[in-house]
Image: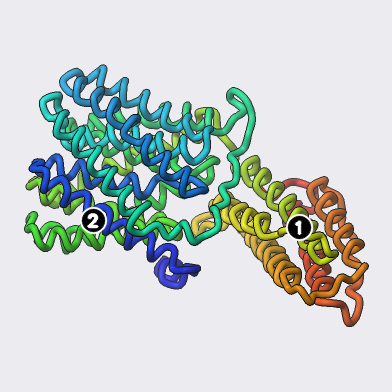
């Protein structure tokens, strides 16, 4: 876990800038709320609103990010109103919370914008429970949310918009389907069922902090698509919470809400959340737990018993998610993994075709967008295969095959990057054999996705660099056939 965080590549220092900008944006939001005369509750609400605005908005373009950021209050303020109005009506409050959970997950069908708005809606309702928001506080809370989102947007799109110098991000479209065949629809039902379990059991554990269990269930479902992914994420959430509580006992409890030390630790925790989110969910949860502990210390209610309660409620929420994905409209690891691998393989062929066309002299051929898409698809494959390569997975044969698949897909990506680098050279050879080599790669992809064997040709001696990459790609595709299918023809993973 340590190695994954401290040795993970950070091209262009993107994660570093992402985290540093978050500290600046959230800090500005809290300062603005303070200058506006808001109470501690208002400042905390504003800081969390800014955190969500900077963390959850992931549209492919800067323009899209700005539009989504502008829409956040339009979703968050009505939810905040409902939470405050229903504060003294437990049954209606709980049913509304479950509705927000279901609709928030269902909104993912509309891509990154739907996902961002769904997360913001859920977290607004959650924060209202955290701060015991009532109707009398609504004007201040409205102002805190609006000012903080504006402050976050000022930093993100004005002071430090490093995305303008980057190519547009490639976001693979979620799997399609209709009705219950759509993964997002099934997940909405699962999340609602899991949150219902967490809500009931969480209230039996604590009548005041029950919402922690619902929050744990919700976040286990974020960025997961299969039963296996959810199980692994639940385990990592509990692990990160355990480690975070240990750190909070050393840092947050002794601080006792002291202003300067709390501000420093909160800034470090915010940086940690943003910097580690892309590489380790366990580390991210560690910093989230420390952040929550510091906020409770600031509010004057932090004790070791409260931290122990957080661990119990987190375990309840994770259990709710596990039960939901196991018994409510389960989405198998195999179906999700197979779909992403198929898409990655088709993208491999598209990259090859564009690079070959560029080498053949086609002026408008540009393999760069397809290469970026391939990187995103491979990241999604790694996420879907994570349950199979997890250290606690007892099925050693499947674990070995899954690792072999990942290694060979990485080989494919390496050959593709090499081919694209050759194609970018204006002096590169326009060898007539490129078309034939590209056709062989296309045939290999079709054979692999169709479950047929691939015959690998002998690599010709003294080939041009582009042909060497194409042949290496064909060889990696051929070797993929074995781990993707067992000798009996069964898939990589079981149903």
Of the residues under marks 1 and 2, which one precedes in the sequence?
Answer: 2
Q: Nearer the viewer, residue 4 or 266?
A: 266
Q: Nearer the viewer, residue 238 or 184?
A: 184
Asked if residue 388 can be seen in this view, the reply is: no
For residue 268, above or below residue 44:
below
The residue that disc 1 covers is 365
The residue that disc 2 covers is 290
Residue at the limit of the structure toward the bottom, as seen here:
462
Tell me if 494 is positioned left or right of 14 in this view. Answer: right
- Tell me the quarter of the picture where residue 123 sits: top left
- Tell me the quarter of the picture where residue 374 sits: bottom right
Tell me if 386 is positioned left or right of 341 in this view. Answer: left
Tell me if 341 is positioned left or right of 218 in this view. Answer: right
Residue drawn at 88 percent across, 57 percent down: 439
Label total for image = 2
In the image, residue 89 lies at what x, y percent?
A: 19, 18
């Amino acid at each position: 876990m340590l190695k994954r965080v401290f040795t993970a590549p950070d091209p262009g220092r993107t994660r570093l800038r992402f985290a540093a900008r978050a500290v600046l944006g959230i800090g500005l939001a809290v300062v603005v709320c303070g200058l506006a005369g808001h109470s501690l509750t208002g400042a905390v609400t504003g800081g969390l609103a800014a955190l969500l605005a900077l963390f959850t908005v992931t549209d492919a373009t800067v323009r899209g990010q700005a539009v989504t950021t502008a829409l956040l209050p339009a979703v968050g303020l009505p939810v905040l109103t409902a939470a405050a109005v229903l504060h003294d009506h437990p049954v209606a409050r709980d049913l509304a919370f479950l509705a927000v959970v279901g609709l928030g997950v269902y909104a993912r069908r509309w891509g990154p914008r739907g996902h961002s708005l769904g997360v913001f809606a859920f977290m607004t309702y959650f924060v209202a429970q955290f701060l015991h928001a009532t109707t009398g506080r609504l004007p201040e809370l409205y102002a805190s949310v609006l000012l903080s989102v504006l402050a976050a947007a000022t930093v993100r799109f004005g002071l430090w918009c490093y995305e303008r110098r980057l190519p547009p991000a490639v976001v693979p479209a979620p799997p399609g389907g209709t009705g219950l065949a759509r993964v997002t629809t099934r997940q909405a039902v699962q999340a609602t069922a899991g949150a219902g379990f967490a809500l009931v059991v969480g209230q039996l554990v604590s009548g005041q902090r029950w919402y922690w269990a619902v929050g744990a269930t919700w976040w286990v479902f974020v960025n997961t698509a299969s039963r296996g992914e959810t199980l692994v994420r639940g385990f990592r959430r509990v692990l990160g919470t355990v480690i975070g509580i240990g750190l909070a006992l050393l840092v947050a409890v002794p601080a006792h809400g002291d202003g300067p030390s709390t501000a420093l630790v909160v800034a470090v925790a915010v940086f940690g959340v943003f910097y580690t989110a892309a590489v380790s969910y366990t580390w991210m949860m560690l910093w989230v737990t420390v952040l929550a502990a510091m906020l409770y210390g600031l509010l004057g209610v932090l004790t070791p018993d409260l931290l122990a309660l957080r661990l119990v409620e987190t375990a309840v929420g994770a259990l709710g998610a596990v039960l939901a994905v196991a018994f409510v409209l389960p989405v198998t690891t195999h179906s999700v993994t197979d779909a992403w691998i198929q898409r990655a393989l088709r993208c491999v062929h598209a990259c090859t075709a564009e690079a070959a066309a560029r080498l053949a002299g086609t002026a408008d051929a540009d393999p760069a967008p397809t290469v970026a898409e391939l990187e995103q698809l491979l990241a999604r494959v790694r996420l879907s295969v994570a349950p199979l390569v997890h250290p606690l997975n007892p099925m050693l044969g499947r674990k070995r095959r899954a690792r072999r698949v990942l290694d060979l897909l990485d080989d494919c990506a390496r050959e593709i990057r090499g081919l694209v680098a050759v194609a970018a050279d204006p002096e590169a050879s326009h060898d007539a054999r490129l078309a034939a080599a590209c056709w062989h790669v296309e045939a290999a992809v079709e054979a692999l996705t169709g479950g047929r064997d691939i015959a690998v040709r002998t690599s010709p001696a003294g080939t041009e660099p582009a042909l060497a990459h194409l042949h290496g790609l064909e060889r990696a595709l051929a070797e993929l056939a074995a781990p993707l299918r067992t000798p009996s023809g069964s898939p990589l993973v079981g149903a």
